[in-house]
Image (cartoon, rainbow, N blue to C red):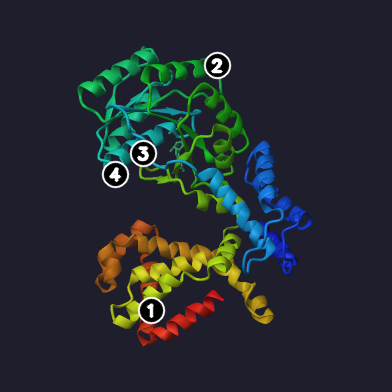
Amino acid sequence: MASALTDKLSRLVKQMRGQARITEANVQDMLREVRMALLEADVALPVVRDFIARVKEKALGQEVLGSLKPGQALVGIVNKELAATMGEGVADINLAAQPPAVILMAGLQGAGKTTTTAKLAKHLQEKRKKKVLTVSGDVYRPAAIEQLRTVTAQAGAEWFASGPEQKPREIALAALDYAKKHFFDVLLVDTAGRLAIDEVLMQEIKELHAVLNPVETLFVVDAMQGQDAVNTARAFKEALPLTGIVLTKLDGDSRGGAALSVRQITGAPIKFAGVSEKLDGLEVFDAERHAGRILGMGDIVALVEQVAQGVDMEAAQKLAAKVKSGDGFDLNDFLGQLQQMKQMGGLSSLMDKLPAQLAAKAGQVDMGKAERDIRRKEGIICSMTPHERRRPDIIKATRKKRIAAGAGVQVQEVNRLLNEFDQMRTMMKKMKSGGLMKMMKKMGG
Ligand code: GDP
């Protein structure tokens, strides 16, 4: 999916090599590709225009730093600007209020409000040790109230009963009162959604906001929503002082351009990303990673970083010292190497450095698959306990089964990874630290 853009940009990058400055002429072609990529990722048109204008301004006339080539420098600027646009603000939930801290959930029906409410309840209970109460203000769909009850129980939090015969305002006041009397730290208020924006809905949630005076008003939006996200976001922003955004369904295959649109329209920070239907599928939003996803060019960006920074020499030195001191190479180091491989622009970027004949051969390799393999390996290592990572030899049948289940792979795949690690460790043992440093330097080019 992403490789078309990657290819195009690679070609443009190559064409631009040898030019010392970014100029209006050479920047145009590149920006056209970036613009297309943003539109393909479903970023709304006005947002794309604004963004491209900002990038152009930053790029024009900028001196090219050190060994960076103009094309690469531009990609760097684009990526930085994307990440900066989406990344400002505080990531975690603000609970600085007289308890109970109220969090109001807003968004269209189906956006993932109820699921996110339960995910947040779990997050706040487990990670921040808060006592959490949930309540549903959706008086139109009894099923929604029931759904919140179920997921709240799964999250290990408490649910406050409400019914379709009540007014949302009444429910809010009763829940607030209950939360105060029973010393809850946080009250999460799920609200009614409609399939589209309508006045009654907006009026109702405004009224709820006034009654509850929430410390956080979170706008929940489906990452797959694409262009429509803009209108929804605008309507909610006009009705409510939004304090944060939760972008759901990022596990889907959309490029997630809605993030940029919604961030720009509302001005509110994107705090969390929903990455599965399950209650632990909530992650702190990572703007940089998401920038790469939107442009579908993670490896080009990484190539720029690689040229800019070289290999992470500090990590390489640490590793070398470890081998030298006989501390042993463990799975954490192995994971570090995988991550460094990704940082170096993935495998595709290394192709650039290969002699023509080899590159033609390498071209037959499925780069997407190779990179997916790295991610799977990361997943497996991440399913191990810290102890297992330090002492891989203790990983026997039962542990393997658990690790495989955790990473969603077959046991054979865990075996393969452990074999690979073993080979690497043997190699490391043989290698003198000087040799390792040399090898790393060579890889960094
Ligand atoms: P609400 O109408 O806004 O309360 O939306 P729900 O919480 O009922 O979610 C609508 C659907 O989206 C349900 O099937 C959820 O399981 C699903 N869903 C919510 N968040 C995510 C997510 O992050 N990833 C995936 N894959 N599904 C999600």
Identify the residue under disc 3.
119
Q: Position of residue 266 (x, y in %)?
A: 54, 32
The answer to whether 403 is drawn above or below residue 199 in the figure is below
> CB at mark 3 closer than 8 A to ligand 1?
yes
Amino acid at circle 2: Glu
- Gap between marks 3 and 2, in whole Å? 29 Å
Q: Position of residue 3 (x, y in %)?
A: 64, 59
Q: Residue at x 46, y 41 (%)?
A: 89
Amino acid at circle 1: Ala
> CB at mark 2 closer than 8 A to ligand 1?
no
Q: Nearer the viewer, residue 202 or 322?
A: 322
- Gap between marks 1 and 2, in whole Å? 64 Å
Amino acid at circle 4: Lys
Q: Is residue 177 left or right of residue 299?
A: left
Label 3 neighbour load within 10 Å: few <14, some 14-19, many 20+: many
The answer to whether 177 is drawn above or below residue 2 in the figure is above
Identify the residue under disc 2.
199
Q: Earlier in the sequence, mark 3 or mark 4?
A: 3
Q: Nearer the viewer, mark 2 or mark 4?
A: 4
Q: Earlier in the sequence, mark 1 or mark 2?
A: 2
Q: Residue at x 57, y 52 (%)?
A: 80
Label 1 neighbour load within 10 Å: few <14, some 14-19, many 20+: many
Identify the residue under disc 1.
320
Question: Taking the image as drawn, is residue 195 in sight?
Answer: no
- Mark 2 and mark 4 residues within 8 Å of each other at the beta carbon: no
- Gap between marks 1 and 4, in whole Å? 36 Å
The answer to whether 104 is drawn above or below residue 345 in the figure is above
Q: Is residue 32 left or right of residue 86?
A: right
Q: Secondary structure at mark 4?
A: loop
